[in-house]
Image: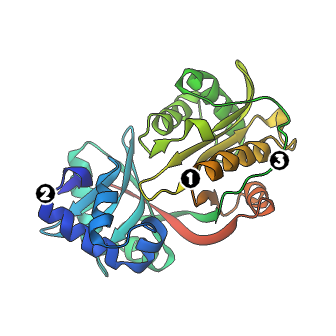
Amino acid sequence: MLVRASKCSADVRQDTAIFAFGNEKFRNETLPLCKNPIEAGEALASSDSWFVLLNGQPIAVFKLHLYGSTARISQMCTKKDSPAIVAATLRRELRDMKITNISLRVAADEVEGYAVNGFARGETYLRFSRIPSESNMMPILPLTNPTQKELPILSQLMHASYAKTEHGFSDARFAEELLRAIMSGARGQYLSNASFASGVRPNIVSACLLTLDSSGEATIEQVFTHPLYRARGLATAEIAASMNRLAASGVSSLIAWNRERNDVVRRLLTKMEFRQDRTVTEMMGQT
């Protein structure tokens, strides 16, 4: 059974919180502000994106986002040595939801367990993090806080930014779906006051969008710049402005995920004193 953490019974929520809090790595990375299982259970139940996978008892907890017929799973915590059970139960539950494709991110020591259970190995992602701090960096272009009113403009910009890469979008519809999920709060609280776009509507040429999860950790969900405006420091200025807002509001951590092969973003994050602290591999399967 697959249920939202916020909709679990009291007993299931307690059992889930105990095993999630007992996983030291998961607790430190995902629930750093929680001091006990009770607080962990409250944090997991505070967002509709957290789900619990049950097979008689909780066997996994993770964030789940749906994009058409694809389920994307991240921040997964599983019972030890249970990839076969998790894989089979996930397939069954997602098949019933009319989902055909599964994408999940797992730690290096879990890759083989999912590979032998029908999942193909995909991209490796690097996690970077740092404590937000204020700076006096001046923006190159006027900065605004993007809202859902700018979705058509931002989706076209995102499409143009990625269209000629190996991860390019065939059209702007997928970009709009992804951006809508971010700005509607489906991936965590959208931080509109800490997200920035360079340029004045309708001439927006770069953007950086942030969310805040239940642990109080901010994430750079997307940062993209039109090819004609790259290498001008726009993304750097946007991230710096975001950190100013986060530092002023007391957010203690900002993270960013980057494909291992994307040297441009890695150099940007390293230049801005982000520290690489985790590696995960995307595993892809079908229901």
In the image, taking residue 200 as reference, residue 58 lies left or right, namely: left
Image vertical order of residue 22 relative to residue 273, above or below:
below
What secondary structure is marked by label 1? Answer: strand
Q: Which residue is mark 1?
A: 219
What secondary structure is marked by label 2? Answer: loop
Is residue 287 visible in this depiction of the protein? no
Q: Position of residue 228 (x, y in %)?
A: 84, 33
Q: Position of residue 52 (x, y in %)?
A: 25, 59
**In the rendered structure, which amino acid carries the disc numbered 1?**
Thr
Q: Which residue is mark 2?
A: 9
**In the rendered structure, which amino acid carries the disc numbered 2?**
Ser
Q: Position of residue 276 (x, y in %)?
A: 66, 70
Neighbor class of circle 1 (other Cα within 10 Å; few <14, some 14-19, many 20+) is: many
Q: CA distance from mark 2 to mark 3?
A: 49 Å
Disc 2 to disc 1: CB gap under 8 Å:
no
Q: CA distance from mark 1 to mark 3?
A: 22 Å
Q: Position of residue 114 (x, y in %)?
A: 38, 71
Ranked by sequence position, the earlier of labels 2 and 3 is 2
Residue located at (45% from left, 77% from top): 25
Which of the 4 image quadrants contains residue 223?
Answer: top right
